[in-house]
Image (tube, grey):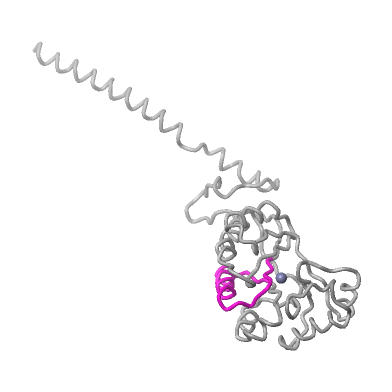
Amino acid sequence: MRELSAVRVRRKWLVVLAAMVALVLGAALAERVPRPISDAVAPTARAAGAEVEPQHHRPVAPDVPPARVPYRGTVYLTFDDGPDPRWTPQVLDILRRHGIEAVFFEVGTSVAAHPGLVRRVRREGHLIGNHTWNHASLTTLRGRAIRAQLDRTERALGERPRCVRPPYGAHDARVDEVIRSRGQRVMLWTVDPQDWARPGADRIVRRILREVEPGARILMHDGGGDRSQTVAALERVITRLQARGYRFGLLDC
Ligand SMILES: [Zn+2]
């Protein structure tokens, strides 16, 4: 009898101990479980226009798709100095994968050498701009020579693009007037990551992300030298800008 009651007492203490362990564990779990109020607050913050970073978003139910990143603005990709049989196809592959269209400011000599590439650029929805026949600095040329640089490229293209990008961005009132008189417009850029100088893919990405703003026209190169860093940077630039809420538009060229 005495032995039986000793077992009962031990059992009673075990029950008390188990209850205490359960309480402590329960409290610890409760700390980690998100409070329902955070889900209630999120839509209000979005409606007020506050930025909601994607990593903070928690879907309310598994079958509800996550909220899209708030729209920040439109940016425009442009590629100069192609077409190039090695780099242009790689740039086109990345753009196609993301469903993005861009303007390619092509050099006439390369257009004449690689007509198949020019066709692919057009076929995939991109636009082509005039980047002169042989990358001439137009401010050093007379009016007739400027026109010859543009005409020769347009004969190779079989059309007159709406946009001209003067090499090195070199233009003045005289160059502008020649271009305007042809029914074309000068199209420069607002973000230059200097990818042509091969500063490393990381730097190219960082420079673009630092300087980008809504409406930015981003300059990159698909020709004129080793463009492996540009190709490596492009994928990251696209995904990082999209994660910030930017969309990619096509310039009116
Ligand atoms: Zn150029």
> Can residue 86 be found in the magenta stretch?
yes
28 lies left or right of 105:
left
26 lies left or right of 251:
left
Q: x, y (%) of residue 8?
A: 17, 17
Q: Nearer the viewer, residue 220 or 69?
A: 220
Q: x, y (%) of residue 68?
A: 60, 56
Quadrant location of residue 40? top right
Q: Can you say whether 126 is above or below 192 in the image?
A: below
Q: x, y (%) of residue 72?
A: 69, 55
Q: Can you say whether 92 is above or below 53 in the image?
A: below
Q: Nearer the viewer, residue 246 or 229?
A: 229
Q: Nearer the viewer, residue 47 or 105?
A: 105
Quadrant location of residue 69? bottom right
Q: Nearer the viewer, residue 72 or 135?
A: 135
Q: Residue at x 58, y 71 (%)?
A: 91
Query: Which residue in the rendered view is the most extreme toward the top?
Result: 2
Query: Which residue in the rendered view is the most extreme toward the front?
Result: 140
Quadrant location of residue 171? bottom right
Which quarter of the figure is the C terminus placed in?
bottom right
Q: Residue at x 14, y 17 (%)?
A: 7
Which quarter of the figure is the N terminus placed in?
top left
Q: Can you say whether 83 is above or below 204 in the image?
A: below
Ligand 1 placement by image quarter: bottom right
Q: Which residues are magenta?
A: 77-102
